[in-house]
Amino acid sequence: MQASERLKGLDVFVCVADRGSFAAAAEHLNLSASAVSKSIARLEARLGLRVFARTTRRLALTEAGAAYYQTCARLLADLEHSEQALHSDRCELRGPIRIDLPAAYGRLHVLPVILDWARRYPQVQPQISFSDRFVDLAEDGVDIAVRIGGSDVWPEALGRRFIGRQHFISCAAPAYLKAHGRPQSTAQLMEHACVIYGQANGLGSPWLISGDTPGEVERRSMPARLTIGDGEAVVAALLAGFGIAQVPTWLVGQHLQSGALVEILPNLALDGLAMNVLWLKKRESLARVDALLQVLGAALRTDGHQVSETIGESSSSVT
């Protein structure tokens, strides 16, 4: 059988599976329900098996149909990506793009960049989610993700652009320091009320404290006045005068500039986790994905809230 014969009806089959009925698929494809039904019948005859289990109430994929659907859907998606890549230089950016961002950093620093970019390309449809959990880009259907931390070894299927490292400082509101004094040493810091980032079970993240030896970093559990599982809520507690917190500068930059928060013990400031833009390599040939990678790589690398370094660069052409 020729390859062209094998491709016949695949788009109809995938559409029926996605839409859940012949009628819905027919409407989407601008075909008659009879034409859709005949296409599926020809496909099943060619394969020699049933791809759909039909009842009076529902239409569902058979076990063999479900396995065949995965292959067909991937094949059609790859074909679409290839065609879009061929025409990307001549076409206006358009289509959906799935993006996953860290909750606080994403809202404060990445979302404004994406919104500004999307405003310039009205045919692009960003689909943005926020999470601090691990995301499997391929399994979750994510085109681009921004992540803080993670392994030093990334899957071959992913492209990566290093954008900097978090820079941690200790800070508090002037009103708190006026009432309780400004600590002058690590020992004095241990005597103060602290706002800790952590979960509702009371397990807060330890603070990173510079040791006596250059480059040495200790992890210390601090006396928690409050334990809060959201970065922006930690800042709200600081502004309300509940104590001292160790936070990344990207989270409190505007409050430091305004004087609403004050850095203490600058000798304890240190660099933390790496920050990366990640993407599926098989999607980077799409014009909209490549364009957004270019924008994010430039904007986040120079936003001034993390420390740059020369290691960890992706081998991708994204700049």
Image (cartoon, grey):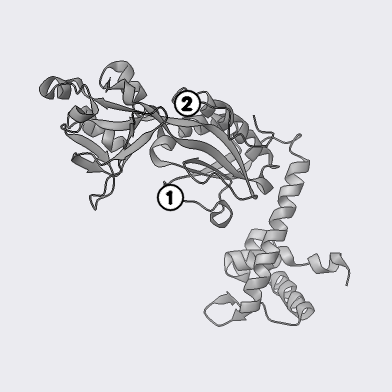
Q: Quadrant of the N terminus?
A: bottom right
Which residue is rendered at x = 64% and y = 34% of the image?
291
**Three-letter code, disc 1:** Arg
Q: Residue furthest left?
A: 179
**Residue 27 position by quadrant:** bottom right
- The label on residue 307 is 2
Residue 290 pos. (x, y %)? 65, 37
**Three-letter code, disc 2:** Val
Residue at the spot of label 1:
133
Report the label total.
2
Label 1, residues with CA under 10 Å away: few <14, some 14-19, many ≥20: few
Q: Is residue 249 left or right of residue 236?
A: right
Given residues 176 and 131, the one toward you in this image is: 176
Q: Regarding mark 1 in the picture, which secondary structure is present there?
A: loop
Q: Residue furthest top?
A: 258
Residue 123 pos. (x, y %)? 61, 38
How far apart marks 2 and 1 lie (CA) works out to 23 Å
Label 2, residues with CA under 10 Å away: few <14, some 14-19, many ≥20: some
Given residues 78 and 215, the one toward you in this image is: 215
Given residues 129 and 185, the one toward you in this image is: 185
Q: Regarding mark 2 in the picture, which secondary structure is present there?
A: strand
Which residue is rendered at x = 73% and y = 36% of the image?
91
Earlier-in-chain disc, 2 versus 1 = 1
Residue 286 pos. (x, y %)? 69, 42
Give yes or no for contact between labels 2 and 1 (Cβ–Cβ under 8 Å): no
